Image: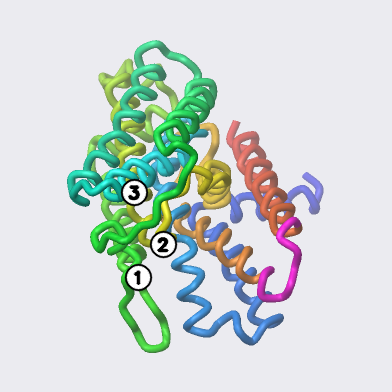
Amino acid sequence: MAPSSSWIGRAARVLTTPPLGPLIVLVAFAAVFTAMSDRFLTPGNLSLIAQQSVIIGTLAIGQTLVILTAGIDLATGAIAVLGTIVAGKLVDEGHAALPALLLAIGLCSLVGLVTGTLVSRLKLPPFIVTLGMLGIVTAATRLFSGGGAFPVMDDLLGWTGNTLRLGGAVITYGILIMLGLYGLVWYLLNHTAWGKHVYAIGNSPEAARLVGIPVRRRILSVYLFAAFLYGIGAWLALGRIPNADPNAMQNANLDSITAVVIGGTSLFGGRGSLIGTLIGVLIVGVLRNGLTLIGIDPLWQDLVTGVLVIAAVALDQLSRWRRV
C-alpha cells in the first residue's frame, strides 16, 4: 500500500471513530474561531451556542435512534412544529396549559406510531414514509393553525426558556432537560436489551430476527419514542422562541440529520454514538456561531455545513469498505 493511501486510511479510522473523530473536529473549529474572534470563548457566547442548540439537539436524539435502525426521519421538524401549534393554539383559546401540552406531545407520538407501523408492518421504505408524513403533518399543522401564529404567554409553556446564572453564563432549563434526555437515551442504548436490539437491527434485520429479536416491535418502538422526543422538543422550542408559528423550523429536518451524521452515526445503521450526536450538534452550533461572529454570509455557513455532511458520509463509506 502506498504511504499516502496508508495515511488516508489512518485518518479515516480516526475521524470515523465516534466520538473521537467528531470531538477532534469540534476542538479544531473552536480553536480557529477563538483565534479569529476574541468574543468566541466568552461565557455569554458559549451560553448562546448552548441555547441555540437546544431544539436541534433534542430532535437529533430521536433522529439518532431512527438512523441506528438504518432508517431516516424527514418529518422531524414538522412533527415538532405540530406540537408547538397544538399547545400554543389551545392555550391561546383559553384551555389549561398542562392538558394542552400533554395533548400536543401525545399527537406527536401518534404520528410516530403511524410512521412506525407503516415501516415495521408494511415494510415501506422509511424515506418514502417520512417524506409523505412531512407533507401530511405540514399541511395539517397549517390547516389547524389557520395560517396564524400564537404568542406563548403561559408560564408552563415558556418555562423551559427560564434561566439560571452560573458565573457569567446563562443556562436555561431547556438546556438541562436536553442534557437529561441525552443521559437517559444513552443509558437505554448502552445498558438495556432494547438498546442492544436497536444496534442489532441496524446491522442486520434478518440476523436480528433469527436470534429472536422482535424486529417489527422494536422498529415501531423506535419511531414512537423518537416522535415523543420531538414532542418534548416542541416544548423546548416554545421556551426558546415564545411564538408558535406554523412556518418555524423549516430546516430542522436537515439540521437534525446533519448533526447525527457529523457526529459519526452511520447512515447505513448499526453504528453510532449518542455522545457523538451531541458533539455533532455542538459542531453545527459552533460553526454557525463562529462564522457569524467573523461576519461570514449565512449562505457560506450552509455551504460549509453541506461539505461537512458529505465528508462525514464519505469517511463512513471508506471505513465500511476497509472492513469488507
Residue 118 x %, y %: 39, 17
Label 1 amino acid? Thr
Which numbered marker is on residue 172?
A: 1
Q: For the residues marked 2 and 1, what is the alpha-carbon distance in whole angstroms?
A: 9 Å
Q: Residue furthest top?
A: 122
Q: Is 136 part of what is drawn in magenta?
A: no
Q: Which mark is residue 88?
A: 3
Label 2 Cα neighbours within 10 Å, binned few <14 / some 14-19 / many ≥20: many
Q: Hey, what amino acid is under mark 3?
A: Gly
Q: Which residues are magenta?
A: 291-299
* Real-space Cα separation, disc 1 to disc 3, in angstroms: 20 Å
Q: Residue 57: x percent and y percent?
A: 44, 55
Residue 191 appears in the picture as rendered: no
Mark on residue 240?
Answer: 2
The answer to the question of whether label 2 and label 1 lie on touching residues, with beta carbons closer than 8 A, is: yes
Of pointers 2 and 1, the one earlier in the residue sequence: 1
Q: Is 312 situated left or right of 19 in this image?
A: right
Q: Nearer the viewer, residue 203 or 313?
A: 313
Q: Are marks 1 and 3 in contact (CB under 8 Å)?
A: no
- Residue drawn at x 75%, y 68% is 296
Q: Is residue 6 left or right of residue 244?
A: right
